Image (tube, helix red, strand yellow):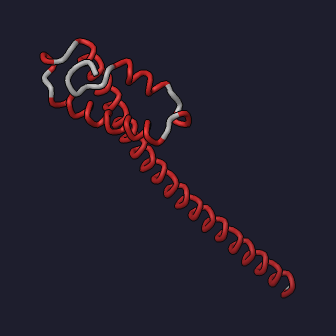
Amino acid sequence: MSDLGRKNVSDKISEAVTPESQKSTLEKTKETVTDKVDEFAGKNTPDNQKSFGQTVSDKVQAGHDDAKEAVNKDQATLADTVGEYVEAAKEQAANAAEYISGVVTGGAEGAKKAADDVTKK
């Protein structure tokens, strides 16, 4: 730890590049706990009391968190938009089916009338 209660930046990098499949349950648990402690310390320590490395690390983490939140928000908006397009497509398909049904029914009625007219003559 570089600052009191803070996770060293090199430890963060090492943990990030190590595949989860190569970590034991104990290592994963330790990372989760130390990440939460580091996050709390980072948010509750003024920048002027942090080392340069911790300040940079906190700014990078904040940017990452903001980007992740924006992506999640955009995904929700995209899902809503896709849902609206699907509903509009369903409505248009129903309209097309109704139109075709009307044309077929009208055509069948017209053909029957024409056949009846021919047989009457």
Horizontal relation, residue 120 to residue 92: left or right:
right
Pick the front one: 8 or 85: 8
Give residue 86's position: percent from left, percent from top: 52, 54
Give residue 87's position: percent from left, percent from top: 49, 58
Horizontal relation, residue 96 to residue 113: left or right:
left
Give residue 54's position: percent from left, percent from top: 25, 18
Q: Quadrant of residue 50?
A: top left
Which residue does the image show at 71% across and 70% down from the upper left? 104
Q: Is residue 105 above or below residue 55?
A: below
Which residue does the image show at 78% across and 75% down from the upper left? 111
Q: Is residue 49 above or below residue 73?
A: above
Give residue 36's position: percent from left, percent from top: 29, 37
Q: Is residue 105 above or below residue 9?
A: below
Pick the front one: 17 or 120: 17
Which residue does the image show at 15% across and 30% down from the upper left? 44
Q: How many marks?
A: 0
Pick the front one: 58 or 107: 58
Q: Is residue 96 above or below residue 46?
A: below
Question: If the image is split into quadrants, where does the N terminus sit?
Answer: top left
Horizontal relation, residue 71 to residue 62: left or right:
right
Which residue does the image show at 45% across and 27% down from the upper left? 16
Residue, far top: 52
Question: If the image is split into quadrants, where does the C terminus sit?
Answer: bottom right
